[in-house]
Image (tube, rainbow, N blue to C red):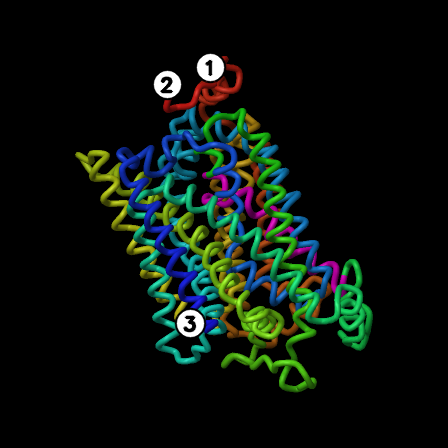
Amino acid sequence: MTTAITIGMIIIYVAIMMGIGVYTSRQARSVNDFVLGGRNVGSWLTAFAYGTSYFSAVVFIGYAGQFGWNYGVSATWVGIGNALLGSLLAWIVLGKRTRIMTQSLGAKTMPEYFERRWNSKGLKIAAALIVFIFLIPYTASVYNGLSRLFNMAFHIDSEAAYQIIIIVMALLTAIYVILGGYSATAINDFIQGIVMLIGIAAVVICTVKNRGGFTEALSSLGQIEVNGKTNTLNSVFGPDPLNLLGVVILTSLGTWGLPQMVHKFYAIKSEKEIGKGAVISTFFALIVAGGSYFLGGFDRLFCTTAEANEAGKTVIPALSNGKLDFDAMIPTLLQTALPDLLIGLVVVLVLSASMSTLSSLVLTSSSTLTIDLIRPNMKKCSEKKEIIIMRGLIAVFLIISVLIAFNKNASISTLMSYSWGALAGAFLGPFLYGLFSKKVTKAAVGTSFVLGIGLTLSHMLLFGFGWFPSLSASAASLPLNLASPINAGAITMILSLIVVPLVSACTKVSEPEYVENIFTCYTSKEKAPAKEQ
């Protein structure tokens, strides 16, 4: 009965999603419509698009499970950081200037922004390649989280079924993004966001009640020993505040340099909508991210390891690489804590969160490749042909992501951390400072690109593949775990913010008059949306 209800809810949800794709397909007549929704998307839709692109199965299944296990209820700080730093402050600092400058430059993608801001085709090509390559592991991590939840809901354990679920999700995403482009994703994101808000609240309440209420659940959590100490998992800052800070920085500051996130500011109707969007986006993040990490803080009350094998808890097995399967923890918690009827709601919740993120990722990747790499090398390329190419690249991007997602040993948090570390580590400093300062040089931007990608790839080679176990053990034993891809990503982002002004101070702006002309967009009285112009 429960399975039938869950399947029915999924069918209704998918039908609505496809219907929106068909409806908006008539509006995607130009590249500007397909990629930016005609730069005519209101504050509510933009704020929900921002939030649903931010939070997916990666957060709800992967990060909430792993960091709830490691830090207890103090993992909630990650959600608070996501709301205040990753949403509110990002909208306030970046929103207005991004909207004005990208419209003035006529930039539709982040690589196109780099080209026109610094008058450099080389920066555009480098940025486009970085975007396409490093969005793939993030997309794979979303598929991984989705398949875990479906396995839990429908009791599917076979490898073939795991792969079929991933393929079906990819096909569904491809259909509605290919049909409607950004307009389809924005409208769907609004509906998906409402489902997420209701679902998270219901899941948290049921989970806490299952363990005797909030006070009783906290007390039980405090009795669990971590490194020989009790009353740490229920404390304000948890058993490891320093490494918890690394998670907050990676997941909050990272949004400032991710192309699929700042892209939302390109498409908003006007700069006047920024203030309202900031409030809506922050509220959304507090409920969804805060609720997800708070929920994960209680996973030790439902899960145990094979060594401990505590009565009344489900044993979480180790993966073939010997590491604990953190991605199985939230599905286990849900299966134990929720009534059967709520399982269907949770499946639709995570499906909503993940499909919105996937649509944003594939649209960003395909538009970047088409606009920044393919179109400039074609003698004749009409807008109709551009849209066809984008739709084809959406399929290519999804196929590659699906193949990576087939590897279960690649944990959700690891895939996302390397993706965010590389992208934000390369782009954060140049994008942020480029909006505010005329003194940022082309050399500084290139240095940030090399630093972000170089450090990420170096960390993957040294620690990501398990080739140097003794080195990994030594790095992990430090107060700040340097073997962690999460901390590596956070460090890379901070270095980007430091390196760009330092290199700019040592180098010269090559075309001062060109730069002066760009910054006149902030003093111009004409602020009408591009569609009206």
Earlier-in-chain disc, 1 versus 3: 3
Q: Nearer the viewer, residue 298 or 525?
A: 298
The amino acid on which the numbered mark 1 sits, given as a three-letter code, is Glu
The local secondary structure at tag 2 comes to: loop
Reading the image, the residue beneath label 2 is: 533
* Residue 138 placement (x, y as % from top left): 46, 57
Q: Are marks 1 and 2 in contact (CB under 8 Å)?
A: yes
Is residue 447 something one can see in this rendering? no
Depicted 389 relative to depicted 379: above or below? below
The local secondary structure at tag 1 comes to: loop
10 Å crowding of disc 2: few (<14), some (14-19), many (20+): few
Q: Nearer the viewer, mark 3 or mark 2?
A: 2
Q: Nearer the viewer, residue 491 or 38?
A: 38
10 Å crowding of disc 3: few (<14), some (14-19), many (20+): few
Is residue 84 something one can see in this rendering? yes
Where the C terminus falls, by quadrant? top left
Q: CA distance from mark 1 to mark 2?
A: 10 Å
Which contiguous range is marked in magenta? 238-263
* Residue located 62% across and 56% down the image: 201
Reading the image, the residue beneath label 3 is: 407
Earlier-in-chain disc, 3 versus 2: 3
User: In the image, which disc is placed on residue 526?
Assistant: 1
Q: CA distance from mark 3 to mark 2?
A: 49 Å
Residue 483 in the figure: left or right of residue 136: right
Q: Are marks 1 and 3 in contact (CB under 8 Å)?
A: no
Depicted 210 relative to depicted 435: above or below? below
* Residue 469 placement (x, y as % from top left): 57, 76
Q: Nearer the viewer, residue 300 or 478?
A: 300
Q: CA distance from mark 1 to mark 3?
A: 52 Å
